[in-house]
Structures are given as structure tokens and as C-alpha cells.
Amino acid sequence: MERETSESSPTTAPKSGACAFVFAPSPLLTVTIEAAPNGGTELHIHPGGQGFWIGRMASILGMDVHLCGPFGGEPGGILVDLIGREGLTVHPVHTASDNGSYVHDRRGGERKEVVEVPPPTLTRHETDDLFSASLAAAMSSDVAVLGGPHCDEAIPAELYSRLCSDLAALKIPVLADLSGPTLTASLEGGLTLLKVSHEDLIEDGRAPSDDLDDLVSTMKSLHEEGAETVVVSRAAEPAIALHDGVVWEVEAPPVQTVDHHGAGDSMTAGLAVAYAAGRPFEDALRLGAAAGAVNVTRRGLATGNSRAVEKMAENVQVRRLDRG
């Protein structure tokens, strides 16, 4: 199945509510092998990639999501169609190479990678087209959300710095869920809100440990580098945030985890929805934590029920931390 795509002809899917632009530099075609209830085998084919997962949860929560990313070859044509069916509007930039993909086997309960095809490195012209299409889509949105690439080689990190800087100049709030080189580049351009996991901060050498004082110190450093607000997820531990000089702790109810994958992306989507709606920061933390909590009760990445997320938010505890 092949479909010629271009940045000037988006595949539309009407949606009510505030509008979000989602930057998805590495859309993936995913295949998951599951055990069927009757003892047989099921095959699930879905779009993937961090940008899409963030966009899907934002759409579930009522946002009009416009996703921009590179699409090429047979996987690209399939992805544009599948993402449109999820209720997102796709602004596809055509590329000469196929999109990345993977096959996971989850019949034993845990995900096992069978094969992975990494996304290609974009050419200079493709990178320019992606930047132009992203800027156009973002200028028509209430909030911009930046997802990361599947691998560092997929896209130049400096594109994030340029995009953040230009969107800031246009007074468009920019939220990002990043790590590594793209995180550093985005801070150079400036961010309204950075969401990052504590594992990524430690792996990147930004935080020496998962000790709370170390993470708070790292959040302050990230703020000084260019992030107005910083939210750090801590796996099963309460998330923490730095906003207007105040440190917050965010604790969701201890629900049973079916699959933790996608929880962070769901949290980012919840934060974006609240920001676009102009809700208070504490409400944004509640909605983000609730979206992540509902996600882990399901097997689908960044999936859930909007009513369940709203009700879960009522049970999320947000409190100030006095760090002296």
C-alpha cells in the first residue's frame, strides 16, 4: 500500500476543543503479537512513536490534534491512514525512505523485541520541509508539543532549538518530553514546560542519583538553562515539579499496573491539554498524573478513557514541598 503525501495536503479528522500541534519526528509502524483468549494468536498493527502516543492521548482528552512528521514508502502510507483513524489530523511530509517499524511478541506477558527497523536519517531537504510544515501547523495551534526521535540519528538536534526559539517568538506555548541531545537543544531555544523522567536525567548525566534533593537541584538547573517549568516523573514514586520557584509533589492513586509503557507520554498529553485550556498549574499536574495512571491499567500505549482520566484526576494529590 503506497500513498503519495505532501506537506500541503493534510489528511483531516475533525475534532472539537482546543488545538494542539504535535511534532512527531519518528512515526513508527508497530506490530505486536498477543495471546488470544481462545489460546490462539492475535496480531495488532498500530501507529507508534512518542509524538503519536502523546497526540493520541491528547485527542482522547478532547483536543484537536494536528500531527506533523515524516512519512515514506509502504509503512508511511499505512501510518498516515492509521493515525487519521485515531482522530488526529496528519500533516505528512513525504520522504524517500520508509518509516521505521518494529515487531514485539507479548504472548508471554512481557514485551520481547522480534525485529526493529530504525527510522532513516532525514535528508537536508526533508528536514527543511519538516521544519516548514511544523511551523505552519504550530502557528494555528493553542499549544505545541514536541516529541523526541526514536534514535538520535533520525533528525538534527538543532532543529529543536530553532523550532523552540521561533515558536517562543510567536508567543506559542511549547511543551516537550525529551532527553539527550534534543533536550539540550530545546533548552537553548526555550521551553514553556519540560517533562522528563528521572531515569533519563540520570542516564544523561544531569542528575547524580534519584535522591529527591538531587532531582530538585537538577530541576533548578534545567530552569536556568531555559525551561520555565519542569516536571519530573519518577516511575512508581510521586512526580515532582518546579513552577514559579515552588517545588510540587504529585501522587496518583496506586493502581495495578498492566503495562507501564506510554505512561510518561500520557502525562505529557494531560499537561498539554490543561495548558491549552488555561487551567491552573495544579490542575495541569492532576490531569497529567491521572492520564498516566489510567494508561498503566491498559495494554495499549497512551490509551484510556477521557471520563476515567477526569475522575482519576479528582484522586490525585498535589502538594507543595518545602525544600528549605
Image (cartoon, helix red, strand yellow):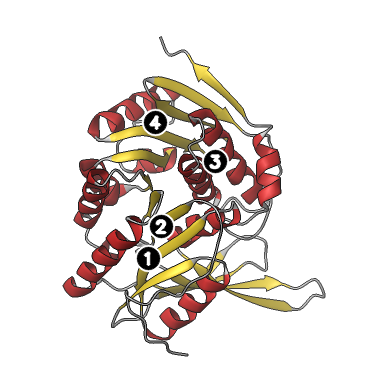
**Which residue bears the numbered disc 4?**
209
Q: Label 4 is placed on what type of residue? A: Ser
For numbered disc 4, what is the local secondary structure?
Answer: loop
From mark 2 to mark 4, how far is it between C-alphas?
31 Å
From mark 4 to mark 1, how far is it between C-alphas?
35 Å
Q: Are marks 4 and 1 in contact (CB under 8 Å)?
A: no
For numbered disc 3, what is the local secondary structure?
Answer: helix
Left or right of 309 in this view: 1 = left
- The numbered disc on residue 288 is 3
From mark 1 to mark 3, how far is it between C-alphas?
23 Å
**Which residue bears the numbered disc 2?**
22
Label 4: how many Cα within 10 Å (few below 14, some 14–19, many 20+): some
Which mark sits nearer the N-terminus, 2 or 3? 2
Which mark sits nearer the N-terminus, 1 or 3? 1
Q: Label 1 is placed on what type of residue? A: Cys
| Tag in front: 2 or 3 | 2
Q: Do the residues labelled 2 and 1 touch (CB within 8 Å)?
A: yes
Left or right of 212 in this view: 310 = right
Residue farthest toward the left in the current orientation of the protein: 124
Q: Position of residue 309 (x, y in %)?
A: 65, 45
Q: Quadrant of residue 241?
A: top left
Q: Where is residue 94 in the image (x, y as percent from the top left)?
A: 32, 79
Q: Label 3 is placed on what type of residue? A: Gly
Q: Closest to the observer: 45 or 54?
A: 54
Q: Where is residue 313 in the image (x, y as percent from the top left)?
A: 64, 36
For numbered disc 2, what is the local secondary structure?
Answer: strand
For numbered disc 1, what is the local secondary structure?
Answer: strand
Label 3: how many Cα within 10 Å (few below 14, some 14–19, many 20+): many
